[in-house]
């Protein structure tokens, strides 16, 4: 009759460790640590371009030999350039519009410019 | 089969308990480690974020420093350059609010009427007087006095639309609404300031005084538009300013467009008091403006100046032009104006409308040279037709003593012998009784700017005065108008050559105020104006210009070449100079069919 094999304390301890380890570590490993909200970091290519476009238009206005840009304000949103303020005459208006349109990455630009009006007279 | 002994089972349980008991401590440690890593990552992200912001600033600075490039923007090259901050930023900001124009020209012009002739016209024998009869109904009863004074070539210096203004915005608290404001004035560079009185008109407005220009306060918010309250041009004018390359010069389009009756006032292009205007934001290329002008009249016929205004609405004081001390030479009550605009690329489309309510033109009757007016006056105050059209009551109140036949209740006077019923030797005659009607104008325009520097402008306009049929024969405020202008840039924009043509269509009728009024041409007369100019930009702010214009008026028409901005008007008035403001009429005399030509050269400086 074959001798019955006994499992002594060390193997039993190892088996217990193994069983416990199979249960406990696995459970712990599958559960991700509680998510901690991170500060939002958004890198917007559009916003970055808007700033650059505005700066470029302002620079171009300042560099143009026939545009007096002291009373012109430029802003850009999603690539659409807005020019607002006062221009001296129609020729300056057209020049500013052409330049603003050139830098606008959208198909259009917004013209909010006014021509400094002259005084009509009676009589 | 393996068999656990109790001791072995106990060992296994103890080991399992030990592992389970120890494991949490291992997990916490690992989590701490993970958290540490996250914190490190967070810190790194923060650093990256700062670096990105720094890069943005550098790119913006580099873009400003770099020369303008036509291509779509990418990452700018070159090191960032910091612009030197202003030494006194507050003062710099304050000074930036000022804007304006200085413009002076030397002109050489002629009224083109030195060879004009005038005649006394009447009805042919057997003709029953009526409006709208053909030429054969009239006879020439002999010549009148010709033009008086210097009506040929004359040299002059002119200030043209010179103005100065200040504007700014004020952010309201923590809101995103701005309070906006502007004050401005027009002034003369080559003459002393003072009331705007000339030999053709009298006005209480003062050149150089703050407010003689677009002046307003208001509110604006991005995406909502702009609301303004003050004294300003109406949308009907401002919407098409850009179609006029000759603004402020001889032959600018205001000579004809918006000018309902010729002469120097631009009825549908003038600045109006007590106006509220809303301007929309851009709506995918579309935009609109709406304005309402408070009439502020306490009389039902608008014969007084509006409350708070120095002049009659429509310009000039009561009595200007040797008329009665009434605002009855084109004064209106309420007004409103609207425009619609579309802009995309080089294309600009515009439509505009303006209404003047209850415009009083009763003074158009005084001194009329139209035979039909003479017929009505000759019928006398007792005639029903005459009494329904002419204001005998006012007439008799003022000069009844000189005309006991028409004003029987008045004691006979000794002066002013009547040469015909209703007329006096000094030219006195009744005004109209109820020549008060709404006037409106509508126009559409198009502009296209080609990339090679050519700009094409075209505009069509219609003006109407809604008179009853009984007064339509003297309605000179109802016609069409056309404008065509081309501008071409040369030398990179340093030089600009422009040509323009304006056409005034025939009016329905004519009041006959011209000294040389010819009834055979009433209602048929037209006018054409031709303009050419050369602008040379000397730098950002200074422009030299050379401009020439010619206006060809048919028989009774009297458009000029300077209305609407040029300081010196070369018009169809002669040099008659008896400035009296009573019932007589010896002021500057208007001549139809004048043919003005002018050349002007000057400089324009903007700041």
Image: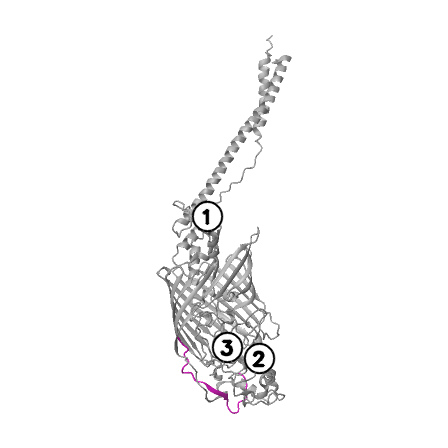
**Helix, strand or loop at mark 2:** helix
Q: Residue at x 50, y 34 (%)?
A: B41
Q: Residue at x 41, y 52 (%)?
A: A59
Same chain shared by disc 3 and disc 2: yes
Q: How far apart in space, not on screen, are marks 2 and 1 (Cα)?
A: 64 Å
| Image position of B84 (left or right of B403) | left
- Give the percent coordinates (x, y) of residue B511: 52, 80
Q: Residues within 10 Å of mark 1 (few under 14, many from 20)?
A: many
Give the residues drawn in magenta, as a range.
B109-131
- Give the percent coordinates (x, y) of residue B227: 56, 60
Same chain shared by disc 2 and disc 1: no
- Which image quarter holds the N terminus of chain A? top right
Identify the disc placed on residue B507: 3
> What chain letter is assigned to the residue under label 2?
B
Q: How many marks?
A: 3
Q: Is residue B273 magenta?
A: no
Residue that extends furthest to the left in the rendered view of this protein: B491
Tell me which corner region of the image, top left, top right, bottom left or bottom right, holds residue B334: bottom right
Q: Nearer the viewer, residue B102 or A14?
A: B102
| Image position of B231 (left or right of B249) | right
Q: How far apart in space, not on screen, are marks 3 and 2 (Cα)?
A: 15 Å
Q: Is residue B7 above or below residue B282?
A: above
Tell me which corner region of the image, top left, top right, bottom left or bottom right, holds residue A34: top right
Q: Is residue B227 above or below residue B437?
A: above
Q: Residues within 10 Å of mark 3 (few under 14, many from 20)?
A: many
Identify the disc placed on residue B469: 2
Q: Nearer the viewer, residue B57 or B475?
A: B57
Q: Nearer the viewer, residue B381 or B34?
A: B381
Residue to which mark 1 is pinned: A49
Nearer mark to the viewer, of 1 and 3: 1
């Amino acid at each position: 009759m074959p001798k019955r094999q006994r499992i002594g304390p060390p193997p039993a301890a190892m088996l217990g460790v193994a069983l416990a380890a199979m249960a406990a570590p696995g459970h712990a490993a599958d559960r991700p640590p509680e998510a901690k909200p991170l500060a939002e970091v958004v890198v917007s290519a559009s916003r970055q371009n808007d700033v650059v476009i505005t700066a470029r238009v302002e620079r171009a206005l300042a560099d143009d030999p026939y545009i007096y840009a002291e009373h012109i304000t430029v802003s850009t949103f999603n690539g659409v350039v807005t020019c607002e303020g006062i221009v001296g005459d129609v020729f300056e208006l057209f020049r500013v519009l052409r330049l603003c349109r050139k830098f606008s990455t959208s198909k259009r630009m917004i013209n909010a410019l006014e021509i400094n009006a002259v005084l009509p007279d009676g009589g | 089969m393996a068999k656990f002994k109790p001791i072995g089972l106990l060992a296994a349980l103890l080991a399992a308990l030990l592992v389970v008991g120890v494991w949490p401590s291992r997990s916490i440690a690992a989590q701490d480690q993970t958290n540490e890593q996250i914190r490190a990552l967070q810190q790194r992200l923060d650093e990256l974020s700062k670096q990105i912001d720094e890069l943005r600033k550098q790119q913006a600075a580099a873009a400003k420093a770099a020369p303008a490039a036509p291509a779509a923007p990418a990452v700018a090259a070159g090191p960032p350059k910091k612009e030197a901050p202003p030494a006194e930023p507050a003062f710099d900001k304050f000074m930036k609010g000022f804007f304006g124009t200085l413009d002076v020209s030397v002109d050489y012009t002629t009224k083109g009427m030195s060879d004009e002739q005038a005649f006394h016209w009447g009805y042919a024998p057997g003709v029953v007087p009526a409006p709208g009869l053909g030429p054969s109904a009239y006879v020439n009863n002999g010549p009148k006095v010709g033009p008086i004074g210097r009506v040929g070539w004359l040299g002059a210096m002119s200030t043209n639309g010179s103005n100065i203004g200040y504007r700014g915005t004020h952010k309201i608290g923590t809101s995103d609404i701005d309070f906006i404001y502007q004050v401005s004035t027009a002034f003369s560079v080559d003459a002393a300031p003072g009331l705007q009185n000339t030999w053709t008109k009298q006005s209480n407005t003062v050149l150089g005084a703050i407010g003689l220009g677009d002046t307003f306060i208001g509110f604006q918010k991005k995406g909502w538009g702009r609301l303004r309250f003050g004294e300003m041009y109406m949308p009907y004018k401002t919407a098409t300013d850009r179609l006029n390359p000759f603004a402020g010069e001889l032959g600018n389009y205001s000579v004809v467009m918006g000018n309902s009756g010729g002469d120097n006032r631009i009825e549908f292009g003038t600045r109006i008091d007590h106006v509220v205007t809303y301007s929309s934001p851009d709506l995918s290329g579309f935009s609109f403006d709406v304005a309402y002008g408070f009439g502020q009249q306490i009389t039902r016929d608008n014969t007084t100046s509006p409350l708070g205004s120095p002049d009659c609405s429509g310009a000039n004081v009561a009595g200007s032009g040797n008329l009665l001390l009434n605002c009855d030479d084109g004064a209106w009550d309420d007004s409103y104006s609207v425009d619609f605009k579309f802009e995309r690329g080089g294309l600009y489309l515009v439509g505009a409308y303006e209404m003047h309510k209850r415009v009083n033109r009763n003074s158009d009757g005084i001194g009329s040279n139209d035979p039909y007016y003479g017929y009505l006056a000759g019928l006398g105050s007792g005639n029903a037709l005459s009494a329904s059209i002419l204001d005998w009551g006012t007439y008799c109140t003022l000069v009844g003593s000189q005309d006991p036949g028409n004003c029987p209740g008045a004691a006979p006077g000794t002066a002013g012998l009547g040469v015909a019923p209703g007329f006096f030797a000094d030219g006195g005659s009744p005004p109209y009784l109820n020549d008060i009607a709404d006037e409106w104008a509508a126009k559409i325009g198009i502009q296209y700017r080609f990339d090679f520097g050519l700009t094409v402008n075209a505009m069509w306009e219609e003006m109407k005065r809604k008179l009853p049929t009984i007064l339509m024969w003297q309605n000179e405020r109802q016609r069409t108008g056309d404008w065509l202008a081309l501008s071409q840039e040369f030398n990179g924009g340093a030089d600009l050559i422009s040509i323009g043509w304006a056409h005034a269509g025939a009016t329905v009728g004519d009041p006959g105020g011209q000294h040389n009024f010819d009834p055979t041409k009433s209602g048929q007369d037209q006018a054409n104006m031709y303009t050419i100019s050369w602008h040379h930009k000397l730098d950002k702010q200074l422009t030299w210009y050379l401009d020439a214009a010619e206006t060809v008026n048919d028989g009774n028409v009297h458009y000029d070449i300077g209305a609407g901005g040029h300081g010196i008007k070369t018009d169809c008035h002669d040099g008659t100079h008896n400035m009296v403001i009573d019932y007589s009429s010896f002021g500057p005399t208007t001549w139809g069919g004048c043919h003005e030509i002018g050349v002007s050269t000057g400089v324009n400086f903007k700041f």
